[in-house]
Image (cartoon, rainbow, N blue to C red):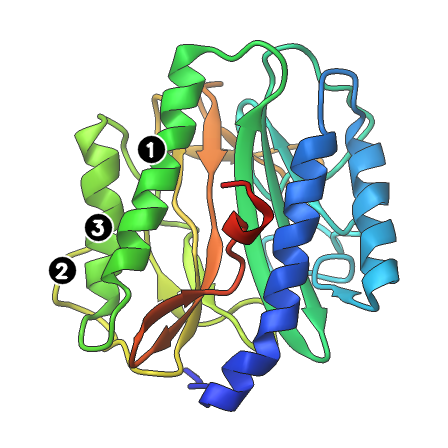
Amino acid sequence: MIELRTPAEIEQMRPAGRFVAEALATLRDETRVGTNLLSLDRRAHDMIRAAGAESCYIDYHPSFGASPFGKVLCTSVNDAVLHGLPHDYTLRDGDLVSLDFAASIDGWVADSAVSFVVGTPRDEDLRLIETTERALDAAIAAATVGHKIGDLSAAIAEVAHGEGYSINTDFGGHGVGRVMHGDPHVPNDGKAGRGYPLRPGLVIAIEPWFLATTDELITDRDGWTLRSADGSRGAHSEHTVALTDDGPVVLTDRSFLGVD
């Protein structure tokens, strides 16, 4: 069921959005060559406790997960792009890292993701990351009352296809509110003018993710981490966005922190 939020409820969602934005900015700033993924998860756990927040991941067990997730942060590295289960891995020079983080405060959820390279970057990785970010910006710009979900999907696809990337639609954006994953589904490819009409009060997570040379995924032996079928790298960008009569409001915007 698709739920629409009142202006007052959207205001109540702001603390969760701000916390998730601040947490991701801190984690990105503290992640470098030599950082262990389990240390990143512990750091995220500490921030959740300090903020009086609750993790959306630790007990999460959807049909596609082998077991409850058990961690509070998704850490996807190189050929991993989604649902990366933190494990004992120390980051190396040139690793492409995607961090995905969702938490709730006072019963309201926010969800966001960022990708970056630690150490010396490769041009093709920076291009991949920048494409996910531009696709996210394009979808947010299209998230106006009167448009449809297909307009967001088409905006994402136009950016991706313009850079020669193919698109997997098995996983995409989703509604956000009292739970992390709700309706509607927001595919990363689609046709403009089709799908659910965008109305004031709709809150969605928009999350373009692309793989460098494939659109096929395989599931890691951990039962969670999704990797490219051909070993190519992936990148992922995501924001929680509320639709209002005055335009889209990015609840997980990090720009107020002086970062992108």
Q: Residues within 10 Å of mark 3 (few under 14, many from 20)?
A: many
Residue 124, position as x, y percentages in the image: 38, 15
Q: Residue at x 79, y 47 (%)?
A: 44
In the image, which disc is placed on residue 249? none
Q: Disc 2 marks which amino acid?
A: Ala
Say if residue 102 shows up in the picture. no
Q: Quadrant of the N terminus?
A: bottom left
Q: Position of residue 14 (x, y in %)?
A: 58, 72
Which residue is label 1 attached to?
Answer: 131
Q: Is residue 242 above or below residue 69?
A: below
Nearer the camera: disc 2 or disc 1: 1
Sort mark 1 into few (<14), some (14-19) or many (20+) by Cα contacts within 10 Å: many
Q: Residue at x 53, y 24 (%)?
A: 79
Contact (Cβ within 8 Å) of mark 3 with mark 2: yes
Q: Residue 203 falls in which quadrant of the image?
A: bottom left
Q: Secondary structure at mark 3?
A: helix
Q: Earlier in the sequence, mark 3 or mark 2?
A: 3
- Image point (46%, 29%), residue name: 234
Does the rendering let one see residue 107? yes
Q: Give how far across and how far down residue 50 sits, in percent.
A: 87, 60
Dot 3 corresponds to which residue? 155
Check disc 1 and report its element: helix, strand or loop. Answer: helix
In the image, what residue type sits under mark 3?
Answer: Ala
The quadrant holding residue 55 is bottom right
Q: Is 87 on the left or on the right of 82, as rendered?
A: right
Q: Where residue 192 is drawn, which disc sits there? A: 2
